[in-house]
Amino acid sequence: MTSTPNATNWTGALRRSAERALPPEKLLPESQPSYVASWIYVFGALTMAALGIIIATGFVLAIMGPTWWHHSSTGHFINSMHLWSVELFFAFMVIHLWGKFFMAAWRGNRVLTWASGVVTFVISIATAFTGYLSQTNYDSQWIATQAKDGINSTGGGALFNVLNFGQMLMWHITLLPLGVGILVVLHVLLVRHRGVVPPFAETKDGVK
Amino acid sequence: MTKAPKRFNPDRDVAPWTGPMRRYDIAKEVTICFLVVALLTVGLAVVFSSPDDKAVTLQQWASATPVDFATTAIAELDGTSGTAGYGGPYNTASPGQSILGVSPSTIIGVHIPVDAAKDFVLSPVAALPDDPLAQQALRSYRSATSTQRATWDAAYETAIASQAASYRDGHLVVPLGNYGPVGVIVNALTQMARSGALDATMLTEQRFFSTDFTKPLLFLSDGNYLANKAAIDHLQGDQWGMMNETGSWPGQAWLWLYTMWYQVPGLSTSPNADLQVWAIMMVLTVVLACIPLIPGLRSIPRWTRVYRLIWRAHYAAKP
């Protein structure tokens, strides 16, 4: 027995809308336009791969507690992986960003894709920053005492106290990573929805 | 009346792709990327490890440089320290930084109250019940007039700043002066810090469990010990410190633009530098997010033609 679509059913409307925006062949395509043939396209995937390592090592550090890595060689190694995956994440992300800039990748109704990438970059910086504040060592002491002046000058220090280790740790391991995660998913879905931006169409009269 | 169709803008619009397609395996690409990054991360962690300089304690500071510690303590007491004169969100001692006549920290007000004299000096010394001399000095200090206290504070501040000030035989030694009970109070606090008791007292003054290091860190940052250590590690603000890391490890390199503004003459010496730098960075961030909508900026990719390098195979096939 088949049922006819009910226009007043929110769940059905949501499913049909999602299917229209991202049919399976669009979400996970097996082919791409012929111009998708450059190493620059790999940096988006490399950024997500580094994020995966960051999350995995972050899970281990969270399970064992914020000071575990100071007195365990295994902990120190996991912390080192966490640090280097963050360094790689930003390196890949910045190359990805500049690549998309020089492709003018916002063309063709892709403004939201670009903006979501920029916001992800900014929130990633905040996430990394709170990580540096959560190291429970001299580095975090110094960064906290220096950073407080900038944040306090904006009035934000009343809510976001960089000298409060407990508060910064919670931002670092819950709120900010959640924000990065949601934005990355949204960004990738937008990329899949709109597809990869085509090259500028050059003619003898100029770029079209 | 019908609306005229928008004119094609090469910096905003694209023609639908009607050219050939090629096989592309996204799942394979992501998997290979993950394996490569995992191997690279493990390799970097094995070869370079990560820095971990132990946290500086008040005990370490008072033991290594007792005169600097005592100098900071008296500055907290007489209200001349960085924290005592900070302003929001800690106190109302300063109007705070402003831009275009607006001071956000003043508008927000005091949300993390810090009384430098009480929190960093008087209350910790009051927690020393086995030191009757210190308790007597505290009573004298608290019962004195504010003018008298200011006179004692100023006299001790001069004494501890003299070349003759030193730490000998378990005590601060300063030239004689009219500083009343202040010498005993500062000496008691210095002893307390050197024993490690001040670290514990300041952290647990509110409750047994605490994860808030605001007060000990503010006190620590008012002295020179932390800053001198940072200068050796190239972490000061005028050394591009926010993006540096202890030792030779890379730090938060992505903060280079934020840090750069603090090196610019004019901004680096401005009393409102922090707020000005934040304002600049907020504007630049909004501009970056809105590039697709800003005529001129969104044309840069087309003008520079770097895209020809990225899509060189495509353009080579279509001369």
Image (spheres, rainbow, N blue to C red):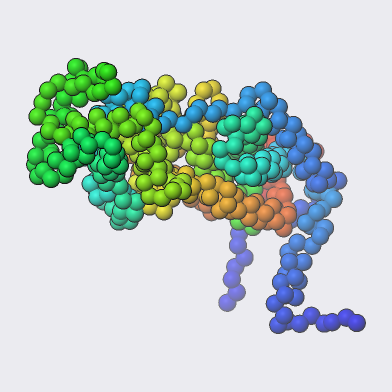
**Residue pictured at 24% horizontal, 29% vertical:** B187
**Residue pictured at 44% horizontal, 24% vertical:** B234
Quarter containing the N terminus of chain A:
bottom right
Q: In the displayed structure, does residue B55 sit left or right of residue B102?
A: right
Q: Where is residue A58 in the image (x, y as percent from the top left)?
A: 63, 42
Q: In the displayed structure, does residue B96 sit left or right of residue A22?
A: left
Q: Position of residue B60 (x, y in %)?
A: 39, 27
Q: Where is residue B66 in the image (x, y as percent from the top left)?
A: 30, 24
Picture quadrant where residue A63 is located = top right
Please say whether residue A119 is visible from this viewpoint: no
Please say whether residue A15 is visible from this viewpoint: yes
**Residue pictured at 28% horizontal, 40% vertical:** B129
Depth check: give the residue in front, B261 or B112.
Answer: B112
**Residue pictured at 63% horizontal, 42% vertical:** A64
Q: How many marks?
A: 0
Depth check: give the residue in front, B271 or B49.
Answer: B49
Q: In the displayed structure, does residue B282 sit left or right of residue B43?
A: left
Q: Where is residue A7 in the image (x, y as percent from the top left)?
A: 73, 81
Picture quadrant where residue B45 is located = top right
Q: In the displayed structure, does residue B292 sit left or right of residue B209?
A: right
